[in-house]
Image: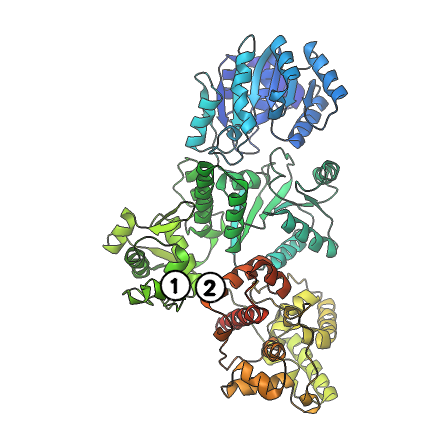
């Protein structure tokens, strides 16, 4: 090992190996096959590069990504180690030159893509030269149980068998369950390998999972708070990458994007701009992952939930490779689950593999919904015993008290049992909440004793509760078309032998207080009221003024995040109020750390909701000359018990105009002290479909929603569902 240490010092500048590296190198130098599971950033490359310098002959490194090869080769050539790579980015002349150099033993380390193993020219070359070692990077790709299966990896063992002298085979991966490890040994035909499993725990990475936030606002807020830091934002689809990229560019941020739909030249430039700190942010699909060795990435944000824990853990491993504290944030919404299921369904034809990927997706969902330590869940998934709480994840840090929810769990389990253990979460939720869904009645579930026994939960809250039960193993939920089933833990809960505790989160409330700025804004309000000859409350209510004076918004987006502010009020009064706020901030030398409050469901511009091709702005009405606003008159009719259609007929207005009146009334911050029957425009099934579409594309463009729902669903139904959800969310926030 003395020579290995000399190599380490001479070429890499280190006087000692990291933990675990020395033993791996020793076994390779002793001629033994090895399988190494080492977390991203743990120093896998040195484990095969150092022995490569000491072994006779050439080391072939099989690597899956062009970007990885280039970075690695550039790096070790810069150290003075002769190396090269062969992949599709090179032309035939360049490849032949490299093959000639390899034949003359002028290359010590040769990187190749696994697909290169199909080339007869390449196979003839390596069969004729002395190959001392074959290093397989990202070895989990050989297994169909791994998260990035590549069929070309299955050829490695055959190629090794063709060599005149069997080389040492060293396999490396950052993410491998026990099942995948066994597969690697079997499929690579490792010869009695020495297995090294370094700890998976990256203590410097803080794991944060946010549910129900407005994703775009969150990211803008986060980036503005970390302007000088380098970060990666992962999205599930190319479309989302492009959309988020356009948003950040429009905000004047320097950012790159990376996905398989972009040409090689564009991706290469984007990657280099990020690697060389020309830009701090890159937005990408999982195509940007393996092989990205940038030590100062301070944060990784997942805009969507990934489809498996292996991929997720490898991607967050891009952060904090220099050992400095870094944050890994996942922004979860229920629509992420459907997106990933769709990707699995369309990308995977093999039934067994599809089933496996869906099971992996469920473990990812379980991670999101667990109330236990996130780090503990992940490490246990990889087979590493970790029983304590890390106190460095959002679950461990979350305030709140453990509350006994065993009775609610018993109700859920009992309902699943009475429904014959044949249905998914959605149907169970409908039965428990006493839904009037047609299918519930057709199946006779309205006759069950569990029908309507959990009405104290909202639909979303009950869904989350059931997902929490699944994540803790209290219910089973597997398969291509998963259904809820009982297990032994379920029975223990029903018998009272096991209790279910849930941490009830403390809802953060803005402390609204009167202050000096409140008085200033109050005076401005009075000036406007006198100019326009309207009561002051019609400008802004006191609660809105108090929130303005405490949070101090200075941009349009921030101003719209204030309760009681819609687009109309922003356009009418925003500049005047923000000017006063800016003046106050400058005078008092105040540093404002802005944080968006509203979730996706409440941060809505109602003017934009109706802004589509088939629905123009409100038509002029006979009430224009009246003192009271037309939308106030509409709401008065609603308070008298009139339906929307009745009001439209009586006032001789379009139905869309009437619905727009309701939306405008709410956007101005008025109290929702009336009931409105919107269910006449849609049934339960249509509502579900529309809500799912809203999760995917948002509220603002009805046309986008219409494009992804069945053609028989009308615009009126969509408008009604949007309005119902908004009223519910706004009401919920007021209660809070």
Q: Is residue 453 left or right of residue 619?
A: left
Task: Indicate which disc, 2 or 1, sits on the residue closer to the N terminus.
Answer: 1
Whether residue 583 can be seen here? yes
Q: Quadrant of residue 519?
A: bottom right
Does residue 474 lie above or below 18 as drawn?
Answer: below
Identify the element where label 1 is drawn: helix
Q: Residue 365 placed where, x, y %?
A: 46, 49
Q: Residues within 10 Å of mark 1 (few under 14, many from 20)?
A: some
User: Which of these two is toward me, 204 or 432?
Assistant: 432
User: Which of these two is toward me, 659 or 171?
Assistant: 659
Q: Residue 725 placed where, x, y %?
A: 52, 69
Picture quarter with the N terminus: top right
Q: CA distance from mark 2 to mark 1?
A: 9 Å
Identify the element where label 2 is drawn: helix
Does residue 157 lie above or below 715 as drawn?
Answer: above
Q: Is residue 549 left or right of residue 406?
A: right
Q: Residue at point 47% right, 69% down?
A: 683
Q: Residue 124 placed where, x, y %?
A: 63, 12
Does residue 200 lie above or below 493 as drawn?
Answer: above
Residue under pointer 2: 685
Whether residue 6 can be seen here? no
Q: Tell me whether circle 2 and circle 1 mark residues in contact (CB < 8 Å).
A: yes
Q: Residue 202 placed where, x, y %?
A: 52, 38
Residue under pointer 1: 439
């Amino acid at each position: 090992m003395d020579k290995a240490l000399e190599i380490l010092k001479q070429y890499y500048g280190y006087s000692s190996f990291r933990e675990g590296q020395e033993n791996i190198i020793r076994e390779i130098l002793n001629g033994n096959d090895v399988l190494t599971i080492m977390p991203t950033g743990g120093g896998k490359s040195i484990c095969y590069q150092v022995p490569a310098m000491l072994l006779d002959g050439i080391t072939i490194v099989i690597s899956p990504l062009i970007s990885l090869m280039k970075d690695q080769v550039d790096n070790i050539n810069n150290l003075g180690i002769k190396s090269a790579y062969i992949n599709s980015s090179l032309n035939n002349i360049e490849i032949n030159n490299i093959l000639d150099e390899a034949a003359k033993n002028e290359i010590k380390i040769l990187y190749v893509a696994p697909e290169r193993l199909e080339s007869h020219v390449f196979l003839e070359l390596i069969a004729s030269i002395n190959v001392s070692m074959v290093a397989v990077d990202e070895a989990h790709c050989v297994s169909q149980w791994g998260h990035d299966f590549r069929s070309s990896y299955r050829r490695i063992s055959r190629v090794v068998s063709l060599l005149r002298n069997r080389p040492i085979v060293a396999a490396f991966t950052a993410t491998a369950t026990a099942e995948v490890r066994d597969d690697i040994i079997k499929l690579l035909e490792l010869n009695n390998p020495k297995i090294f499993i370094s700890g998976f725990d990256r203590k410097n990475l803080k794991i944060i999972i946010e549910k129900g936030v407005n994703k775009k606002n969150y990211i803008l807020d986060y980036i503005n708070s970390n302007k000088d830091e380098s970060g990666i934002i992962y999205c599930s689809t190319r479309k989302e990458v492009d959309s988020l990229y356009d948003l950040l560019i429009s905000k004047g941020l320097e950012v790159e994007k990376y996905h398989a739909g972009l040409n090689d030249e564009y991706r290469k430039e984007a990657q280099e701009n990020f690697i060389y700190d020309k830009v701090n942010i890159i937005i990408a699909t999982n195509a940007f992952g393996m092989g990205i060795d940038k030590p100062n990435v301070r944060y990784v944000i997942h805009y969507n939930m990934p489809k498996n824990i292996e991929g997720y853990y490898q991607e967050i491993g891009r952060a904090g490779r220099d050992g400095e504290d870094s944050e890994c944030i996942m922004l979860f919404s229920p629509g992420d689950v459907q997106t990933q299921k769709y990707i699995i369904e369309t990308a995977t034809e093999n039934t067994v593999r599809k089933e496996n990927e869906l099971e992996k997706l469920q473990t990812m969902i379980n991670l999101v919904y667990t109330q236990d330590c996130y780090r503990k869940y992940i490490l246990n998934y990889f087979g590493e015993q970790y029983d304590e709480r890390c106190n460095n994840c959002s679950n461990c840090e979350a305030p709140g008290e453990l509350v006994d929810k065993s009775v609610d769990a018993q109700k859920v389990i009992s309902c699943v049992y009475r429904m014959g253990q044949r249905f998914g979460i959605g149907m169970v939720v409908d039965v428990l909440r006493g839904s009037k869904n047609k299918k519930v009645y057709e199946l006779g579930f309205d006759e069950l004793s569990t029908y309507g026994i959990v009405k104290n939960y909202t639909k979303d809250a009950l869904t989350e509760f059931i997902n929490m039960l699944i994540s803790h193993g209290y219910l089973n939920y597997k398969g291509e078309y998963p259904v809820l089933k009982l297990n032994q833990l379920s029975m223990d809960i029903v018998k009272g032998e096991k209790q279910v505790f849930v941490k009830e989160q403390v809802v953060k409330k803005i402390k609204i207080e009167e202050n000096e700025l409140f008085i200033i804004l109050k005076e401005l309000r009075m000036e406007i009221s006198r100019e326009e000859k309207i009561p002051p409350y019609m400008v802004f209510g006191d609660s809105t003024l108090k929130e303005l004076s405490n949070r101090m918004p200075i941009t349009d987006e921030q101003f719209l995040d204030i309760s009681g502010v819609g687009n109309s009020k922003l356009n009418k009064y925003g500049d005047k109020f923000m000017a006063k706020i800016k003046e106050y901030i400058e005078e008092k030398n105040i540093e404002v750390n802005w944080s968006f409050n509203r979730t996706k469901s409440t941060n809505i511009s109602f003017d934009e909701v109706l802004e589509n091709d088939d629905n123009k702005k409100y038509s002029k009405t006979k009430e224009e000359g009246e003192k009271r606003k037309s939308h106030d008159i509409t709401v008065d009719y609603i308070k008298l018990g009139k339906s929307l259609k009745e009001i439209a007929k009586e006032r001789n207005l379009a139905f869309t105009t009437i619905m727009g009146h309701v939306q405008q009334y709410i956007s101005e911050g008025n109290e929702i002290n009336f009931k409105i029957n919107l269910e006449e425009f849609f049934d339960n099934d249509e509502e579900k479909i529309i809500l799912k579409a809203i999760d995917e594309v948002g509220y603002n463009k009805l046309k986008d929603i219409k494009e992804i729902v069945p053609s028989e669903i009308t615009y009126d139904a969509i408008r009604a569902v949007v309005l119902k959800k908004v009223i519910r969310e706004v009401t919920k926030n007021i209660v809070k």
